[in-house]
Amino acid sequence: MTSSELWTRATADRYDAEEGERSSAAVLGPTLDFLADLAGDGRALEFAIGTGRVGVPLRERGVPVVGIELSEHMAAVLRRKIDEDRLPVTIGDMATTVVPGRFTLVYLVYNTITNLLTQDEQVECFRNAARHLAPGGRFVIELGVPPLRFLPPGQIAVPFDVSERHLGFDTFDLVEQILVSHHFTRDAEDGRYRRGASRHRYAWPAELDLMARIAGLERERRVADWDGTPFTEDSAQHISVWRKPA
Ligand SMILES: C[S@@+](CC[C@H](N)C(=O)[O-])C[C@H]1O[C@@H](n2cnc3c(N)ncnc32)[C@H](O)[C@@H]1O
């Protein structure tokens, strides 16, 4: 039983249009280069593959990709793009679901480790990645740094997007390490705003390193983006790579 919220059909149907920028060549190009390089001649497993924003083009580059995804609705959108033989997807929880074979790369992008709402489940997710890796294989996570430097005492929310189409802000439970992202998204046709919210368990880079260590993985690299920009105290996100000892 997972703590993750289930992504609905309505969310799945909107996802690709709303994530158009993240699916652009400018964003995906460096992402795919980074992942394809780590996969080498082996196979890749994407945890929480969603509609295949990353997995489908990675497969099209020649990397054999397999996915695990909790939401049948998200997987159904992926299935409209590519058939089961070319990209198999198992419906299940990325913290516990086991698929056949060993992989040179397991990856979990777009902040999705935070969809597991407890520390125990996040540790299990690292363990599950390690379980699927061949010796010498890598686990990659893309994750935002918790934006707590923008939350002085007395302030209740941190805005992360104020644009024509979308207003977004985060609120925090600092004791339980839970962040709620609130979204007001303007409908292109009728101009009305749709409200949505999602819960996340945020985690610091050092906490992830400890989870990796518990899972028997060693940190190999941490950069600020897919282009390999050095990670600093001002970085808003990180791409982290842990390796299973050979
Ligand atoms: C932000 S989307 C990312 C989808 C895709 N990886 C991408 O980059 O576009 C988050 C995805 O995680 C899935 N998800 C959430 N919790 C999950 C879990 N415990 N196990 C597997 N998938 C999960 C959701 O259903 C959704 O498809």
Image (cartoon, rainbow, N blue to C red):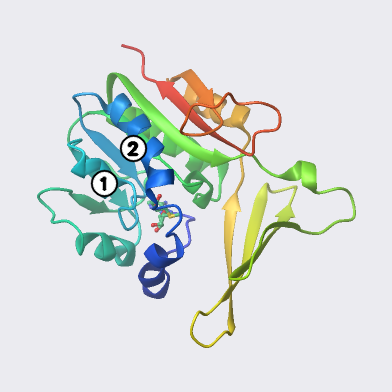
The answer to whether residue 243 is left or right of residue 150 is left
Q: Please determine whether, in this image, residue 5 is positioned above or below residue 99.
A: below
Using the numbered discs, state the Cα–Cα distance from disc 2 to disc 1 in whole angstroms. Answer: 8 Å
Q: Residue furthest front?
A: 26
x and y, in percent, of residue 103 in the image: 24, 29
Q: In the image, 4: left or right of 150?
A: left
Extreme bottom residue here?
190
Residue at 57 percent of width and 84 percent of height:
191
- Disc sitting over residue 185 in the figure: none
The correct choice, above or below, for 105 with respect to 52 in the image is above
Tell me the quadrant of the picture where the N terminus can be found: bottom left
Residue at the (49%, 55%) spot, across then down: 3
Answer yes or no: disc 2 within 8 Å of ligand 1.
no
Circles 2 and 1 in contact, beta carbons < 8 Å: yes
Q: Where on the picture, by quarter, is residue 162?
A: bottom right
Q: Position of residue 227 (x, y in %)?
A: 47, 30
Label 1 Cα neighbours within 10 Å, binned few <14 / some 14-19 / many ≥20? some
169 relative to 105, above or below: below
Residue most extreme to the left: 85
Can residue 95 be seen in this snapshot?
A: no
**Amino acid type, mark 2:** Leu
Report the residue marked by disc 2. 32
The crowd level at tag 2 (other Cα within 10 Å; few <14, some 14-19, many 20+) is many
